[in-house]
Image (cartoon, helix red, strand yellow):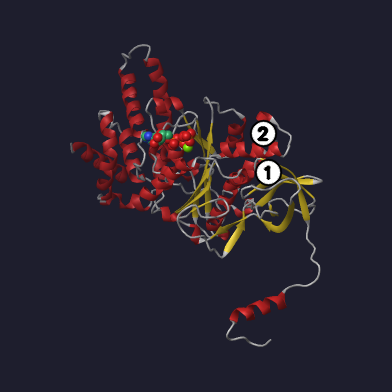
Amino acid sequence: MTGHPETPGLDRLLARIDDAPLGPRAEERGTVSAIADGLASISGLPGAELNEIIVFESGARGFVLTLEEDQLHAAFLDPMVGIAAGDGVTRTGLLVSVPVGEEILGRVLDPLGRPLDEKPPLQTAETLPAERPAPAIIDRDFVSEPVETAVLVVDALFAIGHGQRELIIGERQTGKTSLAVDTIINQAGRDVICVYVAIGQRMTTVRRVIEAVRQRGDAGRTVFVVGEATAEPGLQWLAPFAATSMAEWFRDRGHKVLIVYDDLTKHAATHRELSLLSRQPPGREAYPGDIFYLHARLLERSAKLSRALGGGSLTALPIAEIEAGNLSAYIPTNLISISDGQIVTSQSLFAANQRPAVDVGLSVSRVGGKAQWGAMKAVAGRLRLDYAQFLEMKMFARFGGFGDKAMARRMARGDRIAALLAQPRFRPVALLTQIALLTALNEGLLDTVETDRIEALKPALAPLLEAEPRLDGLRADPGTLTDDQRAALLGVVRSALQTP
Ligand SMILES: Nc1ncnc2c1ncn2[C@@H]1O[C@H](COP(=O)(O)OP(=O)(O)OP(=O)(O)O)[C@@H](O)[C@H]1O
Ligand SMILES: [Mg+2]
């Protein structure tokens, strides 16, 4: 080919003509048979696969949600304006994928990785399908290291291990999101990458979360994936899966990753809506039969990977909403059965100003205890029992006073426990402070301290503990608590109590 130095564009054009394939091209072409809110029924694409992206005549994209013998249902990823029955549809042969890589850190993205922040579009070298298989049993390791949430009630009573799935479940406006977001914020400086997925929430609510992390946490190590309430149902449906793939990219490179799904009740509702529109047979509470499988395959992707696979982990904090305290509704029971424990927040505790409003009796962490630091385990052992007894006694105390001195002592202890477990938002309590407070509680050091003072004691302790050389060993390895360290902790608490 001759060169055209003065018109380089022409060269490129000629090269493209040379490369263009000639002759007929085989292409499957389907037809829209019906459309409904966010969903299209399509006939004539027999080769289409689940999760494959298809393109409508208008240029809008969708992905295959369900396959039937003679038709398929696709959820829209773009607005469905201008699409009508009879329109043509073509396959792309591509599965729904998301951009992955370091570039996504610090970003606010939609479930396809399109920016929702003021920054430019992503240019990542890699993408991953939104749906990926969970790691096999042989590729997993035991959960062995705690996520330090810096929320005392969680770290002491319901420790969460890296690689665990701990459900946060409760009525509306009981602090579910706050608990998860405080945990994300408290990962700053701890080498944990966080992913927050918003599903079906209003953008104003999501913005508040993003602002809180930007102001107080390490937003540069956090990714926000948002399928907001007004987004296409298909995008909302996709959000948790897409975000999990983004998280897995880091997990598979040896990182510790924490993902928050806020919330899966709304995700279940979107799934139900799309299923009913595609005429899947409704089951219990009108949810389709595959709702259990949907969330099981999502949460199974959280895992602690074996050393051979780099030892990374993906920890999941799915959030679920319940009505009128009913933990035995369909979606809650499903989610409880596919996670490794639940933190239950309660309306009555919240109203009684116990915040975080964690119901200690109903909450449990089924694997976290194994991951809890030895030193913490040593001092938190009796806490739950003491507190449960206190709550019971308090109920009876309403019917009359206690003459018994031993009872009065236990009540005093219980009040101190309640004060320790209470924690305002954005006030992290570091591990060493937690251990010091619980040691002091067990020794009865706090029994005479006014409960109002306990909140102030938490921040006051931190610098004193930091300055105590006898605690260097504990700081480096909280795996055990020696007698000398215990004495040092008590010494620090005593001196903190003496300064007015
Ligand atoms: N530990 C806390 N101390 C004080 N206030 C808190 C605490 N936790 C949450 N709150 C307040 O309670 C309110 C509800 O919290 P949050 O939005 O986290 O609840 P939610 O259960 O996620 O609500 P929704 O059901 O609307 O999603 C917020 O105003 C929040 O600031
Ligand atoms: Mg919330």
Q: Where residue 497 appears, x then y in whole percent?
A: 22, 36
Q: Estimate the x, y position of residue 141 in percent, counting from the top left.
A: 56, 52
User: Measured from the top left, where is residue 310 in percent x and y?
Assistant: 54, 60
Q: Quadrant of the C terminus?
A: top left
Judge the density around disc 2: few (<14), some (14-19), many (≥20) Cα neighbours within 10 Å: many
Pinpoint residue 334: horizontal percent, then vertical percent: 61, 35
Label disc, if present, on residue 237 of the rendered structure: none
Q: Is residue 388 above or below residue 468?
A: above
* Mark identifier at residue 39: 1
Residue 191 in view here: no
Amino acid type at mark 1: Leu
The amino acid sitting under disc 2 is: Tyr
Tag 2 near tag 1, CB within 8 Å: no
Residue 287 tag number: 2
Q: Secondary structure at mark 2?
A: loop
Q: Nearer the viewer, residue 191 or 72?
A: 72
